[in-house]
Amino acid sequence: MPVGEKEANMSGKLYAALLDLLFPQKCIFCRKVLRGHESGLCVECAQALPRPDPLATQGGAYSVCAASLCYSDKVKRAIHRYKFGGRANYAKTFGAIMADTIEKELKGRYDIITWVPISAARKRARGYDQSMLLAYTIALELQDVAVETLRKTVHNEPQSNLSGAALRRKNVEGVYEVVDPALVKGKRILLVDDIMTTGSTLSECASALLGAGATEVVCAVLARPDTGSGRIFKN
């Protein structure tokens, strides 16, 4: 290795070590400083995070939804930091967790990876589309690609502000459209989102995709509430 390259390499390592000293990496869930062999989350959280029965079926438009985590306690707080606290970097760890679930539960059941989009106004305010980042990370982990198939045409009330399945269903009716029907026609779609509560948003997106000619829609979410009802989670 040339002398200049060696010096640059040493400088880079020193700079990285200095950053680690000044801004130590923390577990995205418990916020404890990570040890040298840990990345994204600590060993303790990796072993103890609440996990639901991964597969949840529903009587609406999509066939099945695989969830990686239960939406409670430290998981809920971490997702809130990701969505509302500017922690876009969390997508790397979240996406890796989701990719592992997808590989185990949904392998061979889809042709295209896509995501539930947010409105243009919300993306400008937030700075990023959190589900798009998850889909991109998942695709990288699975050596695949994620493509945009849907756009949100209405800047509606956030689902988190509404209580009750009926209000949530009404809030998302007709707010999504397929970008390119030719892209999804005859394809099985994997639809990615961050949180599943009632399933209304996923079902509305799946309806749009099926209406454009997709043959099936399966879903993957980072977290859903622990319903305590086994494999069935109804809309």
Image (cartoon, rainbow, N blue to C red):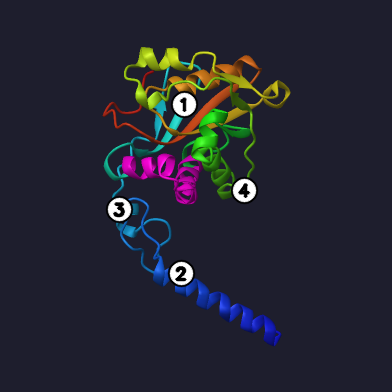
Q: Label 2: which residue?
A: 19
Quadrant that contains the C terminus: top left
Q: Label 1: which residue?
A: 64
Between disc 3 and disc 2, the foreground one is 2
Residue 127 in the image: state x and y as whole percent.
Answer: 53, 41
Q: Is residue 83 left or right of residue 211?
A: left
- Of pointers 3 and 1, the one earlier in the residue sequence: 3
Q: Is residue 57 left or right of residue 125?
A: left
- Of pointers 3 and 2, the one earlier in the residue sequence: 2
Instruction: Measure the C-alpha gap from mark 3 to mark 2.
Output: 21 Å
Between disc 3 and disc 1, the foreground one is 3
Residue 9 in the image: state x and y as whole percent.
Answer: 61, 78
- Of pointers 4 and 1, the one earlier in the residue sequence: 1
Instruction: Measure the C-alpha gap from mark 4 to mark 3.
Output: 29 Å
Instruction: Measure the C-alpha gap from mark 3 to mark 1.
Output: 30 Å
Q: Label 4: which residue?
A: 143
Q: Secondary structure at mark 1?
A: strand
Q: Is residue 85 left or right of residue 163?
A: right
Instruction: Measure the C-alpha gap from mark 4 to mark 1.
Output: 22 Å
Say which of 232 and 13 sits in front: 13
- Residue at 64 percent of width and 35 percent of height: 147
